[in-house]
Amino acid sequence: MNKMFAIPLALVMTTPALVTTSMVAVAQVGTSCADCPNYSGAFSIENTSGVTIPYQVRWGNGAWKQISLRSGHTEIHSYPLGENRAGKAPPPHVRFDRIGGDGKFTAQEYHMKFHAVGYAGYGPSTNTTQPKRYYFEYAADGRTLNLFER
């Protein structure tokens, strides 16, 4: 006789309930935020000037970070906002030498704006926002550099 059929019917009837109860308890243990919203404050700077442009960026009173942006490239700068799309971030700053070719550093500094970008989380919400866009451009004299909003 096959041992599988030798199990009493009462035990077979109660086993699925035990398994189901056990599975429910396991499913309720712990939480995951893999599908939670995750945003960053972000802005981008594009360089179409034809030359590499060195500049510095910082968020709030943090340390300045040196960037060299090659012509034809765009750099995105971001700061984590977490799950709150309207979260606060320290104000970003950009500074650069506004007069090229004179052998001196003539600082130009801007307080930048940013957009909240990122993952809207599981569900019907979507985030189609792009970073706040800026671009470098030289004036007609070919020496005076400025930063403009798109």
Image: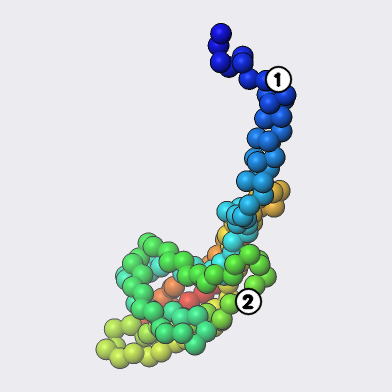
Q: Is 110 on the left-hand or right-hand side of 125?
A: left
Q: Is 119 on the left-hand or right-hand side of 70?
A: right
| Residue 95: quadrant of the picture | bottom left
Q: Is residue 20 above or below residue 35?
A: above
| Residue 1: quadrant of the picture | top right
Q: Circle 2 — which element?
A: loop
Q: Residue 7's x, y, as percent?
A: 63, 20
- Whether residue 93 is visible here, answered yes or no, is yes
Q: Is 112 on the left-hand or right-hand side of 9?
A: left
- Whether residue 50 is visible here, answered yes or no, is no
Residue annotated with mark 2? 88
Q: Identify which residue, 8 or 96, lies in the foreground.
A: 8
Residue annotated with mark 1? 9
| Residue 83: quadrant of the picture | bottom right
Position of the C terminus by quadrant: bottom right
Q: Residue at x 46, y 81 (%)?
A: 58
Q: Residue at x 33, y 73 (%)?
A: 68
Q: Is residue 45 above or below residue 101?
A: above
Q: Amino acid at mark 1?
A: Leu
Q: Identify which residue, 47 or 125, lies in the foreground.
A: 125
Q: Which residue is situated farthest in the left direction here? A: 103
Q: Residues within 10 Å of mark 1 (few under 14, many from 20)?
A: few
